[in-house]
């Protein structure tokens, strides 16, 4: 039973209301004395330093931004009295940044002073004022003029804060007095009202927490997507090196390192994408009848290079007898790759890792044991939490995002299993045990009498590559040429449509995230033309979820490939298109 709160003392309430002006006065004084935030944006550090020197004052807090992106992040995080903005910046100009700022409710009232050394014509000045500027100064800046203008806006901002604080204090005082009067009139009625308000506040808090969680999931998915794009040209360039004869062991070593490190980065990004999908309930298992031994074989093969690099010895026991599961082979392999990689990462050079398989009635247990750094008893309960890393000190840091074991737990549970961890303590190794349900029917399936033939490499094709990432397009073009294809490239949607009409390619590899006109619209326009109906169109995108594939299929794409594309996947896709194999929209 919840204890009742004692009735409020009206005199005490009255005393509180009398103390409110004193408290608000203290708050107002603190707000008045606090430095005013001023955001200065320029892509030249020396210009920022000059502005800092010019505006140096105890009453100002100067925040630097060397790009439009940094400025937007600062505006999201803090409130500013005035924005001093260079017009000519790479990527996004000052005019474009100003339009974004003025288009957002939170930042639309921030005064903007443009600085420029290049644009002095009336049309540029008018454009500056049209973008939302309150002033437009030319470099070199007249120091006293700039300081006086900034001082005016800083004082206006300070006065605005004072008025806002005073209004809030007055509103709080009036509300408090009214509440005290209502309590004196009818305490029971007031108690019911307070209970209702508390319940509503808790419901609002729960709603805000759900919204914050949704935004976090979107952030992870977007981060993973943005990280995929620069990996595409790196992987293509590495594949080119693998196909060219370059003398020397050093060149081969460099090629192997590029491929291996890109593979690691791709796995990290894939883990991020999987975390986002799991949190949003968007992972769908592609279940099939599969032997556990085959799953472990794939996982061991994938993690073997990492173990060899650290000189570990791996032993596998109990996997000789077929044990049939109903699961997603890719996700099951991912579980054990993460556990083996984790064991290798946290075991010193020359360590020992062991996999033991044991059947227990209708389930099978797979343990992955190592003689590595171990886990302290107080940290065992948190190893499967998101972003959790054991021994997260600089001396023991082994990299990673701290999401691998959390992903393992979610994937195991999606398969109806469970996972646990134990360790005798620091320096004494760890054991992770995965338990999965077995199929009731453990009879081996009959072999396919007509196995599907492996896809052969496509014959020479006329291919158009469309990607606004110039390096990515060039690398992909060179790689396709090495495979014997005739290739052209363009970098925007309008050029793509014109190139298809003129070049009449057999295949178009089309990036989705193009400027001005995205890949979906390009595909629709090409398909609307008589010469575009027979063209095979393949989407290239950092997005690989079902929604992206659904939109691609609706726009007229024949295939959807996720960046960076593996060589075997690209080769088999081109071969299947040449043979007229129907599209497959698999995740």
Image (tube, rainbow, N blue to C red):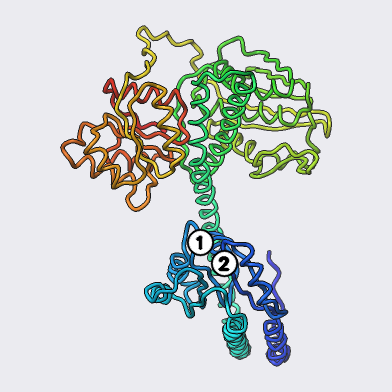
> For the residue carrying disc 1, how many other residues have a C-alpha within 10 Å: few (<14), some (14-19), or many (20+)?
some
What's the CA distance linking mark 2 and mark 1?
9 Å
Residue corresponding to mark 1: 89
Tell me the SS state at disc 2. strand
Q: Hey, which quadrant is residue 36 in on the image?
A: bottom right
Residue corresponding to mark 2: 41
Q: Nearer the viewer, residue 18 or 401?
A: 401
Instruction: In the rendered view, tell whether residue 41 sits above or below residue 396.
Output: below
- Image quarter in which the N terminus is found: bottom right
381 left or right, relative to 40: right
Q: Tell me where residue 461 appears, x and y as whole percent.
A: 30, 24
99 left or right, relative to 72: left
Q: Nearer the viewer, residue 162 or 151?
A: 151
Q: Hey, which quadrant is residue 419 in on the image?
A: top right
Q: Nearer the viewer, residue 553 or 230?
A: 230
Q: Tell me where residue 411 appears, x and y as whole percent.
A: 56, 34
Residue at (37% x, 18% y) in the render: 457
> For the residue carrying disc 2, how many other residues have a C-alpha within 10 Å: few (<14), some (14-19), or many (20+)?
many
Residue at (62% x, 89% y) in the render: 173
Tell me the SS state at disc 1. loop
């Amino acid at each position: 039973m919840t204890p009742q709160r004692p009735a409020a003392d009206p005199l005490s309430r009255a005393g509180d209301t009398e103390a409110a002006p004193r408290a608000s006065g203290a708050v107002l004084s603190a707000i008045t004395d606090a430095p005013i935030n001023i955001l200065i944006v320029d892509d030249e550090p020396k210009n920022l330093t000059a502005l800092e020197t010019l505006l140096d004052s105890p009453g100002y807090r100067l925040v630097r931004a060397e790009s439009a992106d940094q400025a937007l992040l600062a505006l999201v995080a803090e409130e500013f009295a005035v924005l001093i903005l260079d017009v000519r910046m790479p990527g996004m100009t000052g005019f474009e940044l100003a339009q974004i700022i003025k288009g957002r409710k939170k930042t639309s009232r921030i005064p903007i002073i443009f600085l420029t050394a290049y644009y002095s014509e009336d049309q540029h000045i008018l454009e500056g004022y049209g973008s939302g500027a309150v002033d437009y100064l030319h470099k070199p800046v007249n120091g006293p003029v700039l300081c006086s203008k900034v001082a005016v806006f800083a004082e206006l901002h300070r006065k605005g804060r004072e008025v806002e604080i005073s209004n809030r204090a007055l509103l709080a005082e009036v509300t408090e007095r009214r509440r005290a009067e209502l309590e004196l009139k009818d305490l029971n009625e007031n108690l019911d009202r307070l209970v209702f308000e508390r319940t509503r506040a808790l419901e609002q808090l729960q709603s805000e927490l759900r919204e914050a969680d949704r935004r976090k999931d979107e952030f992870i998915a977007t981060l993973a997507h943005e990280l995929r794009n620069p990996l595409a040209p790196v992987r293509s360039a590495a594949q080119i090196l693998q196909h060219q004869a370059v003398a020397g062991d050093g060149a081969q070593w460099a090629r192997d390192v590029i491929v291996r490190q890109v593979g690691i980065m791709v796995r990290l990004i894939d883990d991020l994408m999987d975390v986002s999908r799991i949190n949003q309930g968007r992972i769908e298992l592609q279940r099939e009848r599969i032997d556990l031994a085959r799953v472990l074989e794939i996982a061991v093969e994938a993690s073997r290079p990492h173990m060899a690099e650290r000189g570990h010895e791996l032993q596998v026991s109990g996997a000789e007898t077929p044990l049939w599961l109903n699961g997603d082979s890719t996700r099951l392999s991912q579980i054990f790759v993460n556990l083996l990689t984790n064991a290798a990462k946290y075991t010193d050079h020359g360590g020992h890792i062991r996999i033991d398989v044991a059947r227990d009635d209708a389930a099978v247990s797979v343990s992955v044991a190592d003689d590595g750094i171990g886990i302290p008893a107080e940290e065992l309960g948190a190893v499967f939490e998101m972003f959790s890393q054991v021994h997260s000190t600089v001396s023991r840091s082994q990299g990673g995002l701290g999401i691998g074991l959390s992903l393992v737990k979610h994937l195991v549970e999606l398969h109806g299993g469970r996972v646990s961890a134990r360790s005798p303590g620091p320096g004494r190794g760890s054991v992770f045990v995965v338990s999965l349900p077995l199929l009731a029917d453990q009879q081996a399936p009959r072999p396919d009498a007509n196995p599907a033939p492996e896809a052969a490499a496509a014959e020479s094709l006329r291919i158009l590559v469309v990607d606004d990432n110039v390096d990515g397009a060039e690398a992909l073009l060179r790689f396709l040429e090495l495979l014997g294809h005739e290739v052209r490239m363009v970098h925007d949607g309008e050029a793509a449509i014109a190139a298809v009409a003129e070049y009449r390619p057999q295949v178009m590899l089309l990036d989705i995230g193009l400027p001005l006109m995205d890949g979906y619209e390009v595909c629709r326009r090409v398909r609307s033309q008589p010469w575009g109906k027979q063209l095979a169109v393949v989407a290239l995108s950092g997005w690989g979820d079902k929604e992206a594939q659904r939109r691609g299929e609706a726009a007229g794409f024949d295939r959807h490939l996720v960046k960076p594309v593996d060589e075997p996947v690209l080769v088999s896709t081109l071969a299947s298109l040449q043979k007229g194999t129907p599209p497959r929209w698999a995740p």
